[in-house]
Image: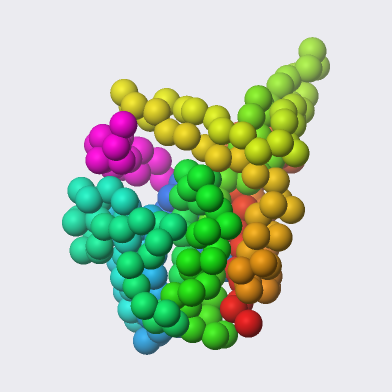
Amino acid sequence: MSWSDLTDWWLEELSGDPAYEQIVTPLLLEVLEPAPGRLYLDVGCGEGRVMRHLSALGSIVQGLDVNPDLARRAGGVVGDMLALPFGDGVYDGVYMILTLEHVADHGAFFTESARVTRPGGVLALVMNHPVWTSPEATPIADIDGEVLWRPGEYFSRGVSVMAAGEETVSFHHRSMSDLLNAASDAGWALEHMVEQPHHELEDQAGIPRLLACRWQLA
């Protein structure tokens, strides 16, 4: 399976789900705090929806995606997320939305994003919460209807494979400490973190669904 095989599935997901506009994009804006005239890199830019949003706010945005169909729609470039095809210290900020969980080597991403960011620049991520991505993790309901959470193998790295139309997508799990320590090792200092519950299911309001973080490069 290549990422190009997922183009139609991804576009259909976006068109039928208001959560991206109502939840995900505002969460990214909260942690990124984009400024007019600043240059940002959208890693895993998809068809460019968030790029256009930031451009409307006066920021300058470039996009990169491994899917050539989506990169072309966004006006971005095709490239490896673990070997960013850009020079050192180019960007005022880098951001990634719901993509890190599909990257096998998160440490390499933190290192590469630091390389292409100027000192004092920022990194903003919105991702599925690590509690959610644990292999075998799932909500369960008891006999009274109360929804609880089975944590699965939270402290073990693993991969969950989920259906994506007629294809599948892999979700790489790593614990919160894995993520934060990898970012710190790459030179990123955590400034702000937000944990978001499920936006649709009231009975899962106590279960974290999304995680958003903002780091600054020393």
Predominant SS of the magenta segment: helix
Give the quadrant of residue 53: bottom left
Quadrant (top left, top right, bottom left, bottom right) of the N terminus = top left
Measured as percent of width and height from the top left, residue 76 is found at: 25, 63
Measured as percent of width and height from the top left, residue 187 is found at: 63, 74
Question: Up-down: is 66 above or below 117?
Answer: above
Q: Report the front residue among 131 and 59.
A: 131
Question: Up-down: is 3 above or below 113?
Answer: above
Q: Is residue 179 visible to the viewer in this orientation of the structure?
A: yes
Magenta stretch holds residue 37: no
Magenta stretch holds residue 13: yes
Colouring chosen for the image of the structure: rainbow
Q: Which residues are magenta?
A: 1-18
Q: Is residue 29 visible to the viewer in this orientation of the structure?
A: no
Q: Residue at x 55, y 40 (%)?
A: 172
Q: Residue at x 26, y 35 (%)?
A: 5
Question: Up-down: is 116 above or below 132?
Answer: below
Give the quadrant of residue 183: bottom right
Q: In the picture provided, is 170 more to the left or to the right than 85?
A: right
Q: Residue at x 42, y 79 (%)?
A: 88
Q: Report the front residue among 3 and 166.
A: 3
Question: Up-down: is 188 above or below 218?
Answer: above
Q: In the picture provided, is 173 more to the left or to the right than 22?
A: right
Give the quadrant of residue 136: top right
Measured as percent of width and height from the top left, residue 194 is found at: 66, 59
Q: Residue at x 52, y 37 (%)?
A: 171
Quadrant (top left, top right, bottom left, bottom right) of the C terminus = bottom right
